[in-house]
Amino acid sequence: MNKLLDLLQKRSVLLLDGAMGTELFKRGLVSGGCPEEWNVSHPDRVQDVHRAYVEAGSDIILTNSFGGTRYRLKLHNLQDRVVELNRAAAQNARAVADAAGRPVLVAGSMGPTGELLIPMGGMSYEECRDAFAEQARGLIEGGVDLLWIETMSDLNEVKAAIEGARSVSAEIPICATMSYDTRGRTMMGVTGAQMAQELAGLGLTAIGANCGNNLIDTEAALAEMRAAAPQMILIAKANAGMPRYEGEKLIYDGTPEVMAAYADRVRRNGVSLIGGCCGSGPAHIRMMRQVLDGLIPVPDAPPPTTPAASEPTGRVRERRVRR
């Protein structure tokens, strides 16, 4: 049963959550720490983040498993605990969703491995597929409603993740998003149109864009997807504006008003699944909910256009924020 499609029949637009990593930092995670390990060492704090988003109005929450493949976990010498940590991530989100008093779906976050596929790197397609299958197994055992492949740059890595997930469950709904960081393309040069054309026939429930270097490029990529595959359900989960460093602190200039206006724009452009990524917290999601529900006027807050002073956001996100 595809619970995502069922919920979309009841509500034409669903609200996602915001960032996970930055919220965990607020709760004590230190730079260089492993967010996924917190699923077992600090489940109360992870659940507190999920709960804050549900209370802000999220219809779908993503698990704290962005870096949950063996390749990412190896950085913390946790590569032998993939299934355990992903299972716990799903169970934490599941507990909050089930207590919400309304339908809230749990999406199993599956971020990039951080490795490059042959010939650009040393990881084979089969190794990549198997790593995602292992992660998917833990997430499904923990009770996710769907799998959420996100922040990808390489179409072949997306395809490996889909194949790995399908080897574990032929039925579970899968969504996939890529990050548009460099002049409207992913770091591997993929356009929105190319993504839609190559993934449209793989049985995904929805595709879209998340993270990204700015709202303008993300929305442009989504417009390309809509034109290339008008039948696909689209996802917009953009960063809160553009990042800049103030000393050691990464700041995003997208206020809740900016993100609420973005939510209205992408809804009017045919996007059905809308949320926030890096820099977005419960306050952003709450105002997005109010605008989408027509409770407050759409803010007059266009997307920031000041060039970012940092490296492309996708790289910042993978290294520092980890969703």
Image (cartoon, rainbow, N blue to C red):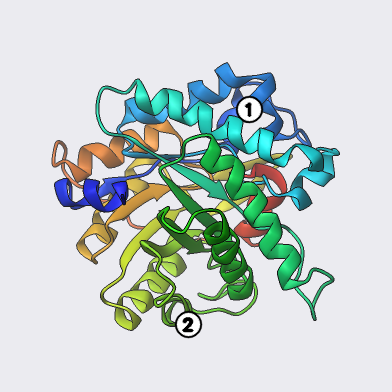
In the rendered view, tell whether residue 272 sits above or below residue 58.
below
Residue picked out by circle 2: 194
Where, by quadrant of the figure, is residue 288 drawn?
top left
The C terminus, quarter of image: top right
Badge nearest the viewer, 1 or 2: 1
Q: Secondary structure at mark 2?
A: helix
Characterize the local packing of mark 1: few (<14), some (14-19) or many (20 or more) Cα atoms within 10 angstroms.
Answer: many
Kindly identify the residue that appears in the image at 48 percent across and 51 percent down. 147
Q: Which mark is residue 180?
A: none
The image shows residue 29 at horizontal and vertical percentages of 69, 27
Where, by quadrant of the figure, is residue 186 drawn?
bottom right
**Is residue 309 visible to the viewer in this orientation of the structure?**
no
In the rendered view, tell whether residue 191 sits above or below residue 47.
below
**Is residue 107 visible to the viewer in this orientation of the structure?**
yes
Characterize the local packing of mark 2: few (<14), some (14-19) or many (20 or more) Cα atoms within 10 angstroms.
Answer: some
1 or 2: tag closer to the N-terminus:
1
Task: Tell whether label 2 touches label 1 (CB within 8 Å).
Answer: no
The image shows residue 56 at horizontal and vertical percentages of 33, 29
Q: Which mark is residue 39?
A: 1
The image shows residue 308 at horizontal and vertical percentages of 59, 59
User: Viewed as shown, does residue 304 lie left or right of 117?
Assistant: left
Kindly identify the residue that appears in the image at 45 percent across and 63 percent down. 209
Q: Secondary structure at mark 1?
A: helix
Closer to us: 294 or 122 = 122
What is the spatial separation of the Cα atoms under label 1 and label 2, in whole angstroms? 36 Å
The image shows residue 102 at horizontal and vertical percentages of 24, 28
Q: Amino acid at mark 1?
A: Asn
Kindly identify the residue that appears in the image at 54 percent across and 47 percent down. 109
Q: Amino acid at mark 2?
A: Gln
